Structure formats: C-alpha cells, structure tokens
Image (cartoon, rainbow, N blue to C red):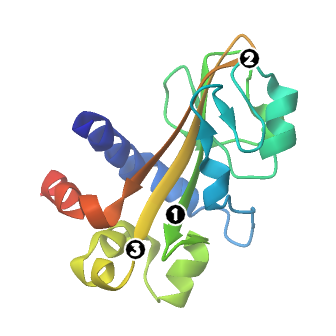
Amino acid sequence: MKKIRTLLFVLFVLTLAPGLLTGCGESAPLLNAADYELDPATSTTSKEVSVGDNAEAFLAAYGDYKIFTSVDGEEYQVLATEEIPFDSAVTLLLPTFFIDGAPTDLDRFCEENEIGKADLTATLNSESFLQDHTVIYSYLLFTWEDGAITAIRSEYMDYNEDAAYYKELNS
C-alpha cells in the first residue's frame, strides 16, 4: 500500500499538479465526495458507470469534468474529450482536492491564499496548514482497452494522516 501511495504522490507532484492548475480562466465543475463512491461488488460508480461501459456512457457521466489521460502508460495530460483515444490502452483520472470537506478549485485556492502555484504542494503538506485544515485528494481511475472500461478504482490520499510520510519521501 505504501508503494502505491508513494507512486501516486510522486505522480501527482510531477505531472498532475501542473495540470490541475492549467487553464486559468477556464472553469470545469468539481466532483463532490459522493461522486467518488464505487460499489465494490459491481464496480459501478455513483454516476452509474461500470466495467464494460463504452465512451458514450463514460462521457455522459463525466464529460464535463477535467479528465487526465494517459495513453499507453505515458505522462498524464488533459485532452479535449473528442481527442481521448478510447480504443487504445488508456487510463483516465478524475481528481479532486477536498479542503475542509469541500471540493476545491486549486486556481482559486492559490489566488485566495496568495500563494504561487509552484508552492501549492508545499502548502498542502505543511504542518501549519494541516493543523487547521483537512486535506483529502480523491480520484477515480478508469482503465480502458479496445473501447471499453476494463477496471475502475476509487482511491484517496489523506494528507492529515500521511503528510509526515510525504515529507519523508521528498527529503
């Protein structure tokens, strides 16, 4: 479990953090906590997307959100929905930060707290911030092959529980 968290944290720091902060002025809706619920018995999301579904079903549920796409294990990037190659080996990620229980637009968070985007990760991991706030990073991960979803995972990282581990990782 620690190896997975390490990998995901490094992935976030190196690739997703800049992506979450791109598109200044462009606003995409944020998923809420209930949107990350996944029925483990049926692998069905709260938006009724499940293993075996196609691009049409996925986009009907998630097409308005910021979708990070990794093709053949390459770096994640935000693609327009019509550019996502659903027929390839692709992984789609839908992330949201929750600060004090509320889904948080990171551009707005940086503006309101007068911090630079480069300082976002350090701020969210800082002892002083975590003493006064809860920070949860939630994400849905959809694996695709040949135009169909083959796996769905819903996971999260609780910065308040794991911050010391992340600081150790970055030292």
Are the residues flagged by discs 1 and 3 in contact, CB closer than 8 Å? no
The mark that comes first in sequence, 2 or 1, is 2
Evaluate whether residue 126 shows in this view: yes
Q: Earlier in the sequence, mark 3 or mark 2?
A: 2
Write the residue at 18% across / 55% down.
Answer: 165
Note whether 156 is above or below 28 in the view shown: above
Q: Hey, what amino acid is under mark 1? A: Phe
Q: Does the CB distance between marks 3 and 2 fall below 8 Å?
A: no
Marks 2 and 1 in Cβ contact (< 8 Å) = no
Q: For mark 3, give the secondary structure.
A: loop
Left or right of residue 17: residue 21: right
Residue at which label 1 appears = 97
Q: Distance between the residues labelled 1 and 3?
A: 10 Å
Q: CA separation, marks 2 and 1?
A: 28 Å
Residue 80 location in percent, x, y?
77, 43
Q: Which amino acid does label 3 sit on?
A: Thr
Residue 134's disc number: 3
Residue 25 vertical position relative to residue 46 in the rendered view, above or below: below
Mark 2, residue position: 52
Image check: 3 left or right of 39? left
> Residue 132 appears at what percent x and percent y?
34, 86
User: Residue sitting at 31 percent across and 42 percent down?
Assistant: 5
